[in-house]
Amino acid sequence: ALSAGRQAALDVMSFESQIWAVAVSAKDKQVISTSSCKKGDFNLPIDKLRVGTMDSLMSLGDDLNKMDMTAETTAFKIFKQLDDLGGRSGSEVEVGGVPIDTHVYNWEWDVAKFKIQTPLRENAELISQRITDLDDQLKKEMSEISALKTAIQTFERKGQGNLMVKALDDVVTDDDSLDTEYMTTLLVVVPKHSYKDFLASYMKFADYVVPLTAKLITEDPEYGLFSVVVFKKSADKFKHSAREKRFMVRDYVFDEAKIEEELKVKNDKVVEYEEKKSKMVAWCKNNFLEAYDMMLHLKCIRIFVESCMRYGLTADSKGNRRPNFKAYLLTPAKGKGEKLRKELASLYSKPGSLLDGDDDMMVPGATGEFFPYVYVPINVDPLGS
């Protein structure tokens, strides 16, 4: 347990958004200083997991990195969707109602979901399949939500823009439209600076324009929309004359039944969208926990496999063979990552080895960075990764 003074120091210290899962030989007695990091045990069931053969460990080790990356990507995609849908109650990242870093430090193997004596590859592949299923379901649900959102936006865009282009369903009413066997109503878009010219000339645009019927229905910053009643046989001539004067006659016929039907379709889609969104928020909350925990199981298997290959097995007091390593969780304090790397290198580099000294070096034939300890990163910032 931490002393009261040490706990108080941790409470005011800020940390990086990545936890380091680190394993070292069980024979190493060096103590990792906590002056530049938060430290805890990684709760691996070291004595219970099945080691298998060295060939099986090496084969699984080749696949685990990809499995781990896929699990992390899927978990964080779920969290990002939760964030995009406005499903978070605060700014802190939580897993099952607990701060994400606290969850990692308290994590334990779920024996109910993944039997501990099942071969490691079977467990890893089972987890990977469940991750794939979650990813497929996420894509399907978000595709449906995206389609609904696009449909709603299409309805909303119809009412956007100026009077030259916007839909007129929300502007024109039944009182603005006259349509009989012989007469019809035309809707003319007129620039504001041309009102006087239009009102003085519109009755001369055709032979059969009903006098003094021009009525301003609505305006925007640039244009006004006028209704004019004409005899149907003069409608084409009126439109032609209006175009010559640079007035635009909108091709619009008021249809109350059509307007009501489109409004109903839009409202139905809004209701469906809100229902799906609400269900998706709940799904993301539940399955971020599920996916993140499965990712931690894969991190556990990675640490176990890589540690068994690096440090081998040892005999316990009863002569039973067991993995020869111990594992920790370390969270570097802000800006202290490089310092912590050097401290770990000084503790665990063996004299005369390639990794003797403070500098990280590449080991011929290895992929990525190689450290004098087993290292697996655990990201705790889904939106920053």
Image (cartoon, helix red, strand yellow):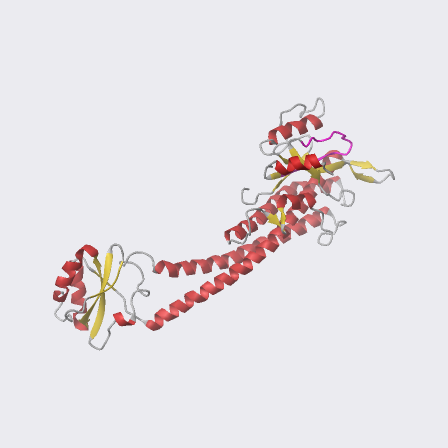
Is residue 306 in view from this perspective?
A: no
**Residue in the image at 58% along x and 57% along y:** 283
**Residue in the image at 29% along x and 58% along y:** 165
Please state the horizontal and vertical placement of residue 5, each as a whole percent of the image: 69, 34
Instruction: Report the magenta residues as a range.
Output: 19-34
Is 175 left, or right, of 326 in this rendering?
left
Q: Is residue 202 above or below residue 288?
A: below
Is 21 left, or right, of 83 in this rendering?
right
Point out the image quarter for the C terminus.
Answer: top right
Is residue 170 in view from this perspective?
A: yes
Is 243 left, or right, of 116 in this rendering?
left
Q: Nearer the viewer, residue 122 or 77?
A: 77
**Residue in the image at 66% along x and 46% along y:** 103
- Residue 301 falls in which quadrant of the image? top right
- Residue 206 falls in which quadrant of the image? bottom left
Q: Nearer the viewer, residue 240 or 126?
A: 240
Please state the horizontal and vertical placement of residue 216, each as a whole percent of the image: 22, 64
Please state the horizontal and vertical placement of residue 170, each as a whole percent of the image: 33, 65
Point out the image quarter for the N terminus.
Answer: top right
Q: Is residue 28 inside the magenta stretch?
A: yes
